[in-house]
Image: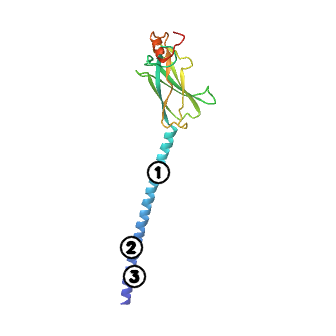
Amino acid sequence: MDKSLYGEHESFSKIQVMGQVSDFEKIVQKKKKTQRKIAKAILVLSALCSILAVAQCHEVFKVERNVYCDTCRIQFQIKISDYIKGASVRLVCRYIEETNTIVDVTEVMTDTNGKYTIEDSGDHENELCDVAVVHSPREDCNEPGLSFDSARVVCSKNFGIPNSTRYANPLFFVKEEALPGCKDVLDELGLFPLEF
C-alpha cells in the first residue's frame, strides 16, 4: 500500500513539476514576445529619428516677393508701378568667408502678378544668400534699379525665424522714361523729385 501511495504521489509530483515547467515556458515565451515588441519599437523610433535628422538637414526654404516696373524712376513702389510678368530672378548663396565661392544658384520666372517663389533646400547658416533680378521681358522697362537689383535673405532656421518662408525686399526694373502721371502721384505723397 505504501508503495502504491508512494507511486501515485511520485506520478502526481511529476505532473505537478511538468505543469510548473510549462508555466515557466509560458513566462519565457511572454518575455521573448515582450522583448521582440520592444526591439521593434526601438527600430521604428530609430528610423523616425533618422528620417527627422535627414529632414532637418534638407530643410526647404521658400523665398517670395514681386518684381515690378518702376514707372516713375524713383526706386520705390507706388500705386502706378506695374508688376512684371516673366522676369527672371535668381537666388545665389555664397560662403561667408569666401564670397567668390558660389554654393547654390536657383533661377525662376515671375508669374502674371510679378510674383516669384524660389524653393531651395539645405540650411545656409554659413552662407550669404541674395535674390537678384536677371532679365526683364519688357523692352520699355529693363534697366535694373541702381544698387537695388538684389535683396539679402536669410536661408537658415538658426536665426529665430519660425517658418520656412522668407520674404525678400521687392525687386524692380526702371522704365526708360517716367510716366506723365508720376508728378501727380508724387505730389499726393508730398514728394517732388528734381527730375520732373
> Could you say which is closer to the camera, residue 68 or residue 91?
68
* Coordinates of residue 85 in the picture (x, y in percent): 43, 19
- Mark 2: amino acid: Gly
Name the residue at 42% across, 69% down: 24
Q: CA distance from mark 2 to mark 1?
A: 36 Å
Q: CA distance from mark 3 to mark 2?
A: 14 Å
> Could you say which is closer to the camera, residue 90 or residue 85?
85
* Coordinates of residue 62 in the picture (x, y in percent): 47, 31
Disc 3 or disc 2, which is closer to the eye?
2
Could you tell me which secondary element the residue under label 3 belongs to? Answer: helix
Could you tell me which secondary element the residue under label 2 belongs to? Answer: helix
Q: How is the image coloured?
A: rainbow
Residue picked out by circle 2: 19
Could you tell me which secondary element the residue under label 1 belongs to? Answer: helix
Name the residue at 44% across, 61% down: 32
Looking at the image, can residue 14 be seen? yes
* Quarter the N terminus occupies: bottom left
Residue picked out by circle 3: 10
Quarter-of-image position of residue 80: top left
Residue picked out by circle 1: 43
